[in-house]
Image (spheres, helix red, strand yellow):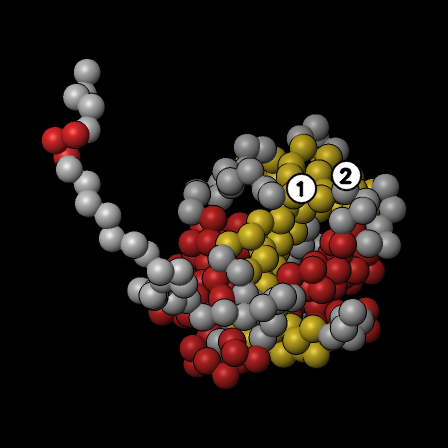
Amino acid sequence: MCDHVKITVWNEFRHEKKNEKVRKIYPDGMHMTLANNLRRQGNFELKTATLDEPEHGLTDDVLNWSEVLVWWGHMAHGEVKDEVVNKVQKRVLEGMGLIVLHSGHFSKIFKRMLGTNCSLTWREAAEKERLWNIEPGHPVAEGIGDYIELPNEEMYGERFDVPTPDKLVFVSWFEGGEVFRSGCCWERGHGRIFYFRPGHETYPTYHHPEIVKVIGNAARWAKPRLVRPHVCPNVKPIEVIKPREVDLRNLPAVS
Ligand code: ZN
């Protein structure tokens, strides 16, 4: 099986410009770190796109090229133009894969695809996160052990207001006591969607090899099996349909 995937990593790219702490961890932006780390992980071709580029960097050419779109956003979800969201949604329904990371749970595109509020509980207290691999046979968990441990992360807790995932691959436990459905798979139209929780901007999560491995696995899993534009045609019958008369007067009376 060909494991080559064309991936576009989209990042809001605002925290890195405003916050020295974030810039130290991701000097060229989270998108560049993640793209460079993914490049080392597999047979991936990578582009990046950011909010402040024209059309947020997601032109028709970029979207048509992309087999998988990775999305990180947080403080500027509202600035993402609806016409871009419409185009991304259309591409996912046609077959493009979508991987939504961390605070992308509140992005317009994630909420659009899932149709729920996508809210959760949260706390920023630099606590330990243990992501339990509960589907070790799933392609997204390939090469991952029983769990991944992150020494410092933001906490996300239930209830995570999303439709029940088609497959739940990771469940997180946090030092403060909460649990969270942190690796979730859905299908919408012909497209596959994976939500992966870790990745708060003030921790070096996208430098962590196992986190990058899961995102690479998810890209291979979400790569389109087919791309089919939406149609709703009026079709001719394949077989000959014989006309038949129905006399409504012969029907039994409704009791
Ligand atoms: Zn966060």
Q: Disc 2, disc 1: CB below 8 Å?
A: yes
Question: Which comes sooner in the sequence, label 2 or label 1?
Answer: 2
Q: Which amino acid does label 2 sit on?
A: Ile
> If the image is split into quadrants, where does the C terminus sit?
top left
Vertical relation: 63 (above or below) 24: below
How far separated are the C-alphas under marks 2 and 1? 8 Å
On the image, the x and y values in percent for residue 35 come to: 70, 72
Q: From this viewpoint, which residue is outermost toward the left?
A: 249
In the rendered structure, find residue 7 and report the number of the disc placed on it. none
Query: Foreground residue, 31 or 235?
Result: 235
On the image, the x and y values in percent for residue 96 come to: 56, 67
What residue appears at the point 70 percent right and 28 percent down from the top-left corner? 177
> If the image is split into quadrants, where does the N terminus sit?
bottom right
Query: Foreground residue, 70 or 176?
Result: 70
Query: Foreground residue, 253 or 140?
Result: 253
Residue at the spot of label 2: 134
Q: What residue type is labelled 1?
A: Leu
Residue at the spot of label 1: 168
What residue appears at the point 84 percent right and 51 percent down from the top-left corner? 144
Vertical relation: 206 (above or below) 250: below
What residue appears at the point 14 percent right and 35 percent down from the top-left corner? 248
Q: Is residue 197 visible?
A: no
What residue appears at the point 49 percent right and 57 percent down from the top-left corner? 189
**Dot 1 crowding, Cα within 10 Å, few <14, some 14–19, many 20+:** some
Residue 237: quadrant of the picture: bottom left
